[in-house]
Image (spheres, rainbow, N blue to C red):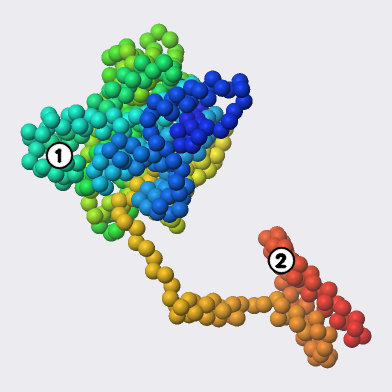
Amino acid sequence: MGVCCSKNREGIEGLAFKPEEEDEEDDDEEDEEENDENRLKFHYDSEEDDDDGEDGTRAVGDCGARVRLKGSCGFASMYSQQGWKGVNQDAMTIWEDFGGASGRIFCGVFDGHGPFGHRVACYARDKLPSKLSTSLDSVRPQFQAHRNDSDDDSGNDGGGGGENSEEFSYWKEAFLKAFEELDKELRNQSFIDCICSGSTAVSIVKLREQLIIANLGDSRAILATRDGKNQLLPVQLTVDLKPNVPSEAERIRRCRGRVFAPEEEPEVHRIWMPDEDCPGLAMARAFGDFCLKDFGLISTPQLSCRNLSDMDEFLVLATDGVWDVLTNKEVVKIVSSASKRSGAAKKVVGRAVRAWRSKHPTSKVDDCAAVCLFLKQQQQQPKPTTSSYNAARWRRDEARSREPSFSESFTTARSGGGGEMELEVRKEEKEEEWTALEGLSRVNSLLGIPRIAKALSWKRRSVKHLEQEIR
């Protein structure tokens, strides 16, 4: 959510599939999108996912990495939904076997803003992982003399370490270089006007026993882990870098930028130029937005790391459209309650959209995007055997036989047989049932069920018809 929060779907889909034919007046725009795609140098396809059959957008990245832009696979779920502000400006990606290392995963979520925010988000989505992979190779010689683990130099990930470890320093240097180069490229791009358009970026590289987290802006990443009582708890891995964060506000004011919340949005602090009330950016760090780069806005990510443990379950990366209306705890509960991993991200986004409508009925729903990365291999449920199936079926039939049945109570009346005793019984049943119905009709819910209402009405007509025949 920034200067302008309209977001685009075609920027994402234009990379994944062949563009649809458009009218002649749109030829220039189509050619421009085609040129954008050629610049990315990816080979895209639309294969069916190998793991769960979900259609996904896949590509081949640097060093043979498998790239996914949407959908799901055995260890991840991705979903984005356009809001009510225009085109969808959220983008996301997952790179499997990142940098040529088996099992290493890069995942990122990008939230564009401004007139061309969708282009900036998609450009960052496709370029950042490649630049990070290149930066890793370029900074490797600087750390090679200090490394004792030769496996790292062949592309394998070593053990964990803290933020003072050489391993983290290596990744930090590569991330900083990649972010800096990407922002410089955006400044020089002729096909994206980034003066008042930009994008956030939250990304994580999962190593064998460690997470490297890089955050730019107000998107967020959380980790779901278990406590001593085996209960799932959220751990926030990033800080929402809003302009009113003390350290961010101090830097902005030092650069002559202004930070304040407008009267119509007293809870949303924004960055403004020194002498003009514009553009009003709602984050302190971002790619692009070069009108503010001299006044405190930076594209330097905030980096951290975390060692993984057996208690850690999954990660969730999402744009502020999700976090503005859902808490960390709610998101963890939603993901953990999903019946299938493949639908976890969609469930998070769906809940966020509903929360927008209920909590902010007068506001436009923001774009929402989420990536769920599962850290443990999914345990497959054993297929039911014939004996267990028969036992379950017997229990179900037994339970049904104990339930009251309207059809059985109507058998006598419908058959037309029986004597006076039977008629008296039917009269008593009639009086009891309709007395009960009259008592419940004031609740309004019982008569609102068409199946029961029709059954009771038919029974009343059947009993009346039986009385007339006997007379």
Q: Kindly identify the residue that appears in the image at 32 percent across and 27 percent down.
A: 245
Q: Name the side, left or right, on which 185 lies relative to 56.
A: left
User: Relative to the observer, which residue lies in front, 317 or 193?
Assistant: 193
Where residue 387 sits in the image (x, y, percent)?
45, 80
Where residue 355 sits in the image (x, y, percent)?
50, 42
Q: Kindly identify the residue that appears in the image at 86 percent across and 81 percent down.
A: 466
Amino acid marked by disc 1? Asp
Q: Name the side, left or right, on which 346 lies relative to 41.
A: right
Quadrant location of residue 184? top left
**Among numbered discs 1 and 2, the one appearing first in the sequence:** 1
Q: Kindly identify the residue that appears in the image at 26 percent across and 44 percent down.
A: 104
Q: Residues within 10 Å of mark 2 (few under 14, many from 20)?
A: few
Disc 1 element: helix
Q: Which quadrant does the C terminus fall into?
A: bottom right
Amino acid marked by disc 2? Arg
Disc 2 element: helix
Residue highlighted by disc 1: 153
Against 85, residue 156 (above or below) is: below
User: Relative to the observer, which residue lies in front, 306 or 101?
Assistant: 101
Nearer the camera: disc 1 or disc 2: 1
So how many labels did they put on this image? 2
Q: Kindly identify the residue that appears in the image at 12 percent across and 29 percent down.
A: 142
Against 445, residue 390 (above or below) is: below
Checking the image for residue 451, the label placed there is: 2
Where residue 276 sits in the image (x, y, percent)?
43, 10
Q: Is residue 199 visible?
A: no
Q: Name the side, left or right, on which 431 lies relative to 257.
A: right
Checking the image for residue 13, the label placed there is: none
